[in-house]
Image: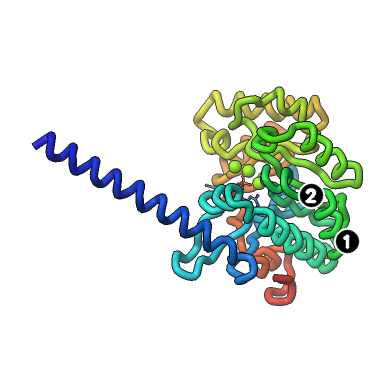
Amino acid sequence: LAKAQGKNRLVVYADGMAATARRRAELQQDLQVAVEGEQLAVHYQPTVRLSDGRTTGFEALVRWHHPLHGLVSPAEFIPLAEESGAITAIGRWVLHEAVAQGAAWSRETGEPLRMAVNLSPRQMADTDVTAEVRAALEASGFPAEQLTLEVTEGVLVRDVDRVVEQLEELRSFGVRVAIDDFGTGFSGLSYLRRLPADIIKIDRSFISDLPAGRSAATLIASIVELARTLGLDVVAEGVETDEQREVLRAMECGSAQGYFFSRPEPAGRAGARLGLAAGTTPVG
Ligand code: C2E
Ligand code: MG
Ligand code: MG
Ligand code: MG
């Protein structure tokens, strides 16, 4: 019986792998038309300053409404888009969309709201990111100083010198660079030394262990201290409870994002949080 069960399990496993491969191939193909097909949307998650609870800006997070599969998570399709190269078109679209939205909100609130956009390694390798960012800023009138580009240590897998050069150039005209998912990679400190950065975003996995996990608290406190020493701002990702918010505030972590404050939302709803009338502000 055990043998038979083992055999069945193998069959199920092989079936699962085939289904996964099929879905990947299908999604990868469908991604080619997702941008032109208007299947993509940008959702916005606020960044909150912990000292006074104010929303200082947003992170743009792409969403894909697949005509057959419904909502597909970026955690699933961004890696596929990286592989196929579709990320360059997607990334460019998100960038334009996000800075246009940031410009509209800044104008309407009269406040210099920040906008953060994620950049993928392939986008930095295959495109002239600097020129694209300039073009997007010019088209929207969004000030460079209000734009943050988020990169992970994945960008260092490719041509390190080129990446450093690109980020330095972006910073030279005022754009800020954030190191996303900090603490999850292999190189940690050494890549902090190599990547020109202004902001560290502490990965959600550390925050989710708060407040009980004492080692998480110790690590977060040392990241906050390290950032202070280096003159960098800190954002904590994935804050889900008031307790976590309070622990982070007490550590003098500058800002935070997370479901406790708000999930990523469509522009209309995110704008309503700024006190703007729904329906008037979405640019997409
Ligand atoms: P990320 O840049 O680290 O974004 C944070 C992710 O954590 C988002 O997932 C967000 O919805 C989620 N999150 C925020 N607060 C909480 C919380 O309190 N609890 C939990 N459990 N999750 C929270 P999302 O939107 O699914 O995006 C996943 C990843 O996909 C992003 O991670 C980013 O690496 C990538 N991504 C999303 N949009 C883009 C894009 O436009 N371009 C590129 N290159 N990558 C993107
Ligand atoms: Mg990010
Ligand atoms: Mg992140
Ligand atoms: Mg993360």
Image coloring type: rainbow
Crowding near pointer 1: few (<14 within 10 Å), some, many (20+)? some
Crowding near pointer 2: few (<14 within 10 Å), some, many (20+)? many
Q: Residue furthest bottom?
A: 279
Determine the secondary structure under disc 2: helix
61 or 24: which is nearer to us? 24
Q: Quadrant of the C terminus?
A: bottom right
Q: Residue furthest left?
A: 1
Q: Which residue is mark 2?
A: 129
Determine the secondary structure under disc 1: helix
Q: Amino acid at mark 2?
A: Val
Looking at the image, is mark 2 or mark 1 earlier in the sequence?
2
Disc 2 versus disc 1: distance between alpha carbons? Answer: 14 Å
| Among the 4 quarters of the image, the one containing residue 93 | bottom right
Q: Which residue is mark 1?
A: 138
167 or 239: which is nearer to us? 167
State left or right for residue 187 relative to residue 177: left
Residue located at (85% from left, 45% from top): 170
- In the rendered structure, find residue 37 and report the number of the disc placed on it: none
Residue located at (41% from left, 50% from top): 21
Quadrant for ligand 4 reads top right
Q: Quadrant of the N terminus?
A: top left
**Residue 41, relative to residue 126: is it above or below?**
below
Could you say where residue 218 lies in the image, as x and y percent from the top left? 61, 24
Q: Amino acid at mark 1?
A: Glu
**Residue 196, relative to residue 146: is it above or below?**
above
**Residue 244, relative to residue 113: is it above or below?**
above
Residue located at (83% from left, 52% from top): 146
